[in-house]
Amino acid sequence: MKKILSLILIASLTISLVACGKSSESTLSSQETEKTKTITDFSGRNVEIPEKVTKVATAWDDFNAAVLVCGASDKIVATANIPGAAPWLYKVFPSLNNALATFGGNFNIEDIMKNKPDLIYVYQSSGIKQKLIDSGIPTVEIKVMSFNDLKQCMTITGETLGGDAVKRAAEFNEYFDDKIKMITNVTSKIPADQKPKVLHLQGTVSPIVCDGTNSTIDDWITTVGGANAAQGVDGTVKEVSMEQVIKWNPDIIVLGTNGDNGIHTGVDQIYNDPKWKDINAVKNHRVYVNPNGMYMWDRNCPEEALQIQWAAKTFWPDLFKDLDVVKETKDFYKKFFNYNLTDDDAQRIINSEPPK
């Protein structure tokens, strides 16, 4: 009888210890989940966010690629993108099809809150910024108007996501700096009077919308040895007259794609419209469509690192004979997106064409 009672006592103690252990583990897990950290965003706001971020919302379509470079595609639960506007984004990262497509005309803060993101990334000047901040979800403001902004954006993205994302963001910034140095080692030696005037337009040419100084567009134009033709225009997406374009008389015209892969109609419009016929870029057949991958290479996203290589090769083929943009694109996608592009895939992205 004593032996039986002893066994019962031992069993009871064991159960109690296991229960206490599980309770302690649960408490520790809860404490870890509740840990927070403070980061400083582009507006200088100190934003308290969870130490462990598992879900994010990207209220700025340029920004998805920054999260993807940081290896966090599975954390995006809401996005400003849609498959039709960014087909390569959804081909390379099909998990984004499960994310709520919002922040546009159908924006609804209640829908965002249902997905319970740990934080939201929003562009600094966005009209919905205050509504997101007022929702109580930690909201991090981002701005990219220069190469330095882009690198800071990557650093902040790494800091907010934590873990391996910090290292991945730093690796991107190092890669970007290396490519800038590789190009400027050549283009810095080009005399000022030999630099082509480059006009960057948005999509089609009616109305004529250009990008001026104080922008990432201006940064890549000058990095690759060009001069921004749109002098006197501050910032991006500014409407100008045909008379002004004629005065500028650009040597090279680059057409952005407005996120619409395959929009080449602007090139035909320029070549076929007699108003453009006396402009140097038209006379010398130097009108190009900008590449388009995860996002438009020409503005505010990590593929700026590919943009400068494409533009350097396009503007100065003799100075960059050994630069293989198809290979660089494939290497970039493998390194930062863990995706194997074929040669044809890479060329289609460079041509601003959607996936087959």
Image (cartoon, grey):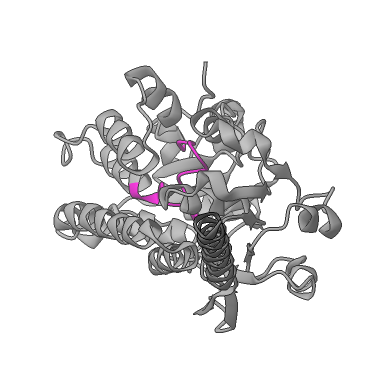
Viewer can see residue 49: yes
Viewer can see residue 249: no
Residue drawn at x 61%, y 55% is 55
Q: Answer whether residue 302 is magenta in the image.
A: yes
Front residue of 107/196: it is 107
Q: In this view, does 345 lie to the left or right of 111?
A: left
Q: Quadrant of residue 270?
A: top right
Tell which residue pokes out farthest to the front in this image.
1
Q: Is residue 125 left or right of residue 312?
A: right
- For the N terminus, the quadrant is bottom right
Residue drawn at x 39%, y 40% is 337
Q: Answer whether residue 287 is magenta in the image.
A: no
- On the image, the x and y values in percent for residue 321 come to 15, 34
- On the image, the x and y values in percent for residue 292 come to 49, 36
Magenta segment range? 290-305
Tell which residue pokes out farthest to the top in this image.
356
- On the image, the x and y values in percent for residue 189 come to 14, 58
Front residue of 317/325: it is 325
Front residue of 160/188: it is 160
In the rendered view, tell whether residue 59 sits above or below residue 128.
above
In the rendered view, tell whether residue 51 sits above or below residue 317.
below
- On the image, the x and y values in percent for residue 165 come to 40, 58
